[in-house]
Image (spheres, helix red, strand yellow):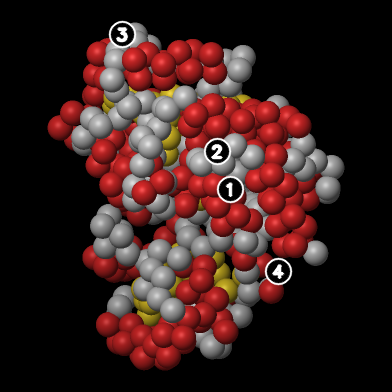
């Protein structure tokens, strides 16, 4: 992330450049809307330009000036724009809870949302939808290397916690590192803790986060501490590489796909990184519970938010709705980021995608009847953590890799919660 001072200095110049170069200029009358996007290896400038043209065809008269966020932290950049009086008309894949309180976002029509999406309220805030629930992720799954499992004499993935520990022990005994972890990046370091918390705490009380907001439960409660101690069990038994906290996220992907470890706890976006040449060697299973019940830490994502301050709310809405319902836009997310599509009345074939068997198996967790909970630290709906708590949760995950003081780390989260909500 660029320094805020540098961002502030560059905003005016960046806006001037993008207004001329991205998404076409104001060439035919009508409104001109500023659209904040981001780029990745899969969501390229060409992708955005093509998707904009397709949506414009459904929203006559709307012209788009596209702004590209200088990092993946779109929320921070949008706040910079807002502070300088340049809040965009349309914002792609932001976290609505960071902006709704200031009255910056316009909700979508409920009838339109209900008519077009499988989980209309999947990312709603107090009953209002600010980003259409177009796609979803599981955070995390446990991905595994079938060849290394076979080498260690493991015939099938574990169904419960006891079997999970047995699998770890067999892998270690066979000289195979059970887990790789991108612990050098805080969000990646948190994946085992997200899995444990989701399975053992949220799986038993899906309303736990709502209860935390109501001050009915705490992170330092005995049942939470007992659950988190499972993470310490994995660490103290040597099931992670000792240098895991120094491994960057990108390198952890390479280590896992290169056969350096047997398992990898990560969000389902890893599906976009599964090597095509030996994709059938990889499988996935949910983070295991004590009793074997299936708990899916689920996150409903979305497309674009609409500014409440836009001078053309009708044009902005028509463009945003058209963009959100275009299957071609989801194709890139499905194939590149492992996103699970959530449009009504469509199968994978309707998106013209090529996916792996592990993708299909993972997608089944979304469509099957099981216990789905809002993955802690990843939800964008009413179960989103208070501002700043995500970073504190990540910090606790890294600290617990070396510290056995589970209760102490959970008490720090309670204090951070109190500070953030007072």
**C-alpha distance separating marks 3 and 2:** 27 Å
At 70% from the left and 34% from the top, the residue drawn is 224
Q: Earlier in the sequence, mark 2 or mark 4?
A: 4
Q: In the visual, does 290 lie left or right of 62?
A: right
- As drawn, which residue projects farthest toward the left? 277
Q: Earlier in the sequence, mark 4 or mark 1?
A: 4
Q: Position of residue 364 (x, y in %)?
A: 44, 27
Which residue is under mark 4? 101
Residue 336 tag number: none
Q: Given contact means CB atoms under 8 Å apart, are the residues at marks 3 and 2 in contact?
A: no
SS state under label 1? helix
The residue beneath circle 1 is 396
Q: Considering the numbered disc 4 on the image, is that residue within a helix, a strand or a loop?
A: helix
Q: Which residue is mark 2?
A: 193
- Asked if disc 2 and disc 1 are in contact, CB closer than 8 Å, the reply is yes
Task: Pick whichever of labels 2 and 1 is earlier in the sequence.
Answer: 2
Do tag 4 and tag 1 residues touch (Cβ < 8 Å)? no
């Amino acid at each position: 992330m660029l320094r805020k001072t540098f961002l502030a200095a560059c905003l005016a110049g960046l806006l001037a450049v993008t207004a001329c170069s991205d998404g076409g200029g104001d060439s035919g009358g009508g409104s001109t809307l500023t659209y904040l996007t981001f780029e990745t290896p899969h969501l390229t400038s060409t992708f955005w330009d093509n998707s904009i043209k397709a949506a414009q065809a459904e929203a006559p008269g709307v012209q788009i000036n596209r702004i590209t966020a200088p990092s993946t932290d779109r929320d921070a950049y949008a706040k910079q724009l807002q502070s300088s009086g340049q809040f965009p008309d349309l914002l792609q894949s932001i976290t609505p809870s960071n902006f709704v309180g200031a009255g910056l976002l316009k909700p979508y029509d409920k009838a339109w949302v209900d008519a077009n999406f499988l989980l209309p309220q999947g990312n709603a805030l107090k009953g209002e939808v600010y980003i259409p629930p177009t796609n979803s992720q599981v955070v995390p799954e446990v991905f595994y290397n079938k060849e290394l499992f076979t080498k260690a004499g493991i015939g099938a993935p574990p169904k419960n916690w006891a079997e999970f520990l047995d699998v770890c022990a067999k892998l270690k005994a066979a000289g195979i590192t059970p887990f790789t972890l991108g612990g050098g990046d805080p969000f990646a370091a948190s994946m085992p803790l997200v899995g444990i918390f989701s399975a053992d705490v949220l799986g038993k009380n899906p309303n736990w986060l709502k209860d935390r907001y109501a001050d009915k439960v705490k992170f330092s409660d005995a049942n939470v501490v007992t659950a988190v101690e499972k993470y310490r069990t994995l660490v103290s038994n040597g099931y992670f590489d000792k240098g895991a906290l120094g491994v960057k996220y990108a390198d952890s992907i390479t280590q896992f796909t290169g056969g350096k470890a047997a398992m990898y706890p990560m969000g389902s976006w890893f599906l976009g990184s599964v090597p095509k040449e030996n994709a059938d060697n990889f499988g996935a299973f949910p983070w295991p519970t004590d009793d074997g019940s299936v708990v899916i830490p689920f996150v409903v994502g979305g497309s674009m938010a609409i500014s409440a301050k836009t001078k053309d709310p009708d044009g902005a809405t028509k463009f945003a709705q058209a963009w959100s319902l275009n299957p071609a836009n989801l194709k890139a997310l499905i194939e590149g980021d492992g996103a699970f599509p959530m449009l009504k009345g469509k199968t994978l074939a309707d998106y013209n995608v090529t996916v792996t068997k592990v993708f299909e198996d993972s997608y089944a967790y979304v469509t099957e009847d099981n216990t789905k909970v809002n993955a802690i630290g990843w939800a964008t709906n009413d179960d989103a953590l208070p501002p700043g708590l995500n970073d504190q949760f990540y910090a606790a995950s890294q600290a617990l890799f070396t510290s056995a003081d589970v209760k102490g780390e959970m008490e720090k989260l309670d204090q951070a919660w109190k500070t953030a909500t007072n």
